[in-house]
Image: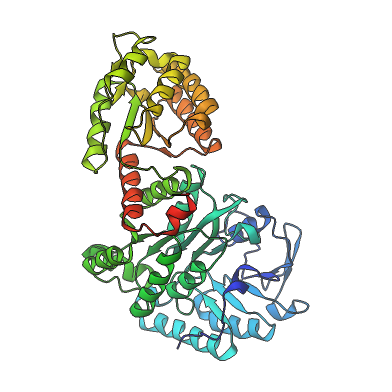
Amino acid sequence: MKNTHQPSLDFLFNPNSITLAGITTAEGGHWTRTFLEGLIASEFDRPMYLVNPKGGEIKGHKVYTSVTDIPGSIDYVIGLVNAQRAAKLVEECAEKGARVVHFCTAGFSETGEEERIRLESELVEVAHRKGVRIIGPNCMGIYSPKSRMSFTPTFPNESGPVGVISQSGGNSIYIVRQAALRGVRFSKVISYGNACDIDESDLLEYLADDADTEVLALYIEGIKDGRRFRRALEQATKKKPVIMLKGGNTEGGARAVAGHTAALAGSRAAWDALCKQLGIISVSSIEEMVDVLVTLLFLPLPKGRNAVLFGAGGGASVLITDEFENRGLRVPALPQEIVAQIREFTPVAGNILRNPVDYSQAIMNPEGVRKTLEIILMWEGTHFLVVFVRTGQFVHAGPLAARTSSLAAMFFANQRSFPKPVAVVLELSIEPHEADAIATAIRGCVVSRLPVYYSFAAAANAINLILTHAENRPDHRLRRRLGL
């Protein structure tokens, strides 16, 4: 039976203290230490208690031999004990006034073993009887920069507008790390695992009303209560954009879901229909989810589908045009009067001024690029600009990489004066000179709050998804937030 006595989940994200019950005292990189390192790195500023029967000290923090030895009351507990000890820990925590226990511990119902299923049922029964909420088990818990809570030391301390609900701990880490590299920051991220008590519907209802969360990203493997979850989604999509990645869409994936979080995956057709009916942005990978987040946050919503594609390379120009037009975006030819203006300072050889604009030779002239973009973006026939850089197609990597960096510096210095939305495609490379230049350019995009993508297809797909979402929901908060 679920424990539903709490009217709000605010207490999860605003604990008076955090207790790490079962942290190892052994030196080395044991996984239980990651939670302590995360709290230290995030500068958690309330009491922090460590518990291990051996006692001692870790990183200047006293280690208590049991929860009952902690002076005064406790609040939020991270359970790092084994599955057989979990129910007993909840009883001890309840006696000390704890309101929630997050169990990172695995080895419960996700194993499919009868004894392990019984252990999870026992855990739920004790928690319900004692009035304690449970996150998990088998999950990473909460990352909330505003509350200085983190389960790893590698996450940014700055907060942002994105809330994440992820059934998988590993996927929650991957989402945050990949998105953070491109400038995305988060309000609250919750990895909730087996959802024996607090589940996806609880979290969705909470984040839908959370003032710090403007965009919701969900990784879901299965749900506990289909009707309630649909109601929660329906309410959430009325208030903010919702992106969903559904795991376990194939027969093999569904088997993996059962062994991962003990969830029932459901049919792909049912999930696709749900997303379409409720206006959810459905994605098929974490990479696609991150692309959509980047687009939502950093690309002002274009007023139409007409793109100007600007870069170097005839073959690259062909391929990026195909990617955009195959996804319902338009790449209209530049009018002759626009071409004539650009030709006044641009050589004919090696520079094709049609749209896509292949600026192969003149692209090494940053001032010429600036003037060209200003002229193109004044044209009423374009709604947004995509600049693409593919250093790997050139013969001499070193000089080209250096010039790419020079071009990027000019672009970042002037992009705020451009009158239309601008996106950047920087294809990755493992060649050392190119990799360094691309990494520098990506960091420049992040500082300049420009959306940056790693492939033509990724950019086209994400921009199309956001435009389709806005077109289908003309009264949506997304359009109001962007002033449209």
Could you say which quadrant of the image residue 55 lies in? bottom right
Q: Quick one: quadrant of the N terminus?
A: bottom left
Residue 17 placement, left or right of 279: right
What residue lies at 23% left-to-right and 27% top-to-bottom? 318
Could you say which quadrant of the image residue 309 lies in? top left
Q: Position of residue 109 (x, y in %)?
A: 39, 77
Residue 285 in view here = no
Of residues 122 and 209, the one nearer the viewer is: 209
Q: Residue furthest bottom?
A: 129
Does 442 appear above or below 409?
below
Q: Position of residue 379 (x, y in %)?
A: 36, 28
Does 264 appear above or below 87?
above
Residue 160 placement, left or right of 305: right
Residue 398 in view here = yes
Does 397 appear above or below 24?
above
Q: How is the image coloured?
A: rainbow
Of residues 290 and 191, the one nearer the viewer is: 290
Q: Position of residue 392 (x, y in %)?
A: 35, 24
Residue 16 placement, left or right of 188: right
Q: Position of residue 149 (x, y in %)?
A: 62, 61
Q: What is the total number of numbered labels drawn onto the structure image?
A: 0
Of residues 258 and 305, the one nearer the viewer is: 305
Could you say which quadrant of the image residue 217 lies in? bottom left
Of residues 291 and 224, the one nearer the viewer is: 291
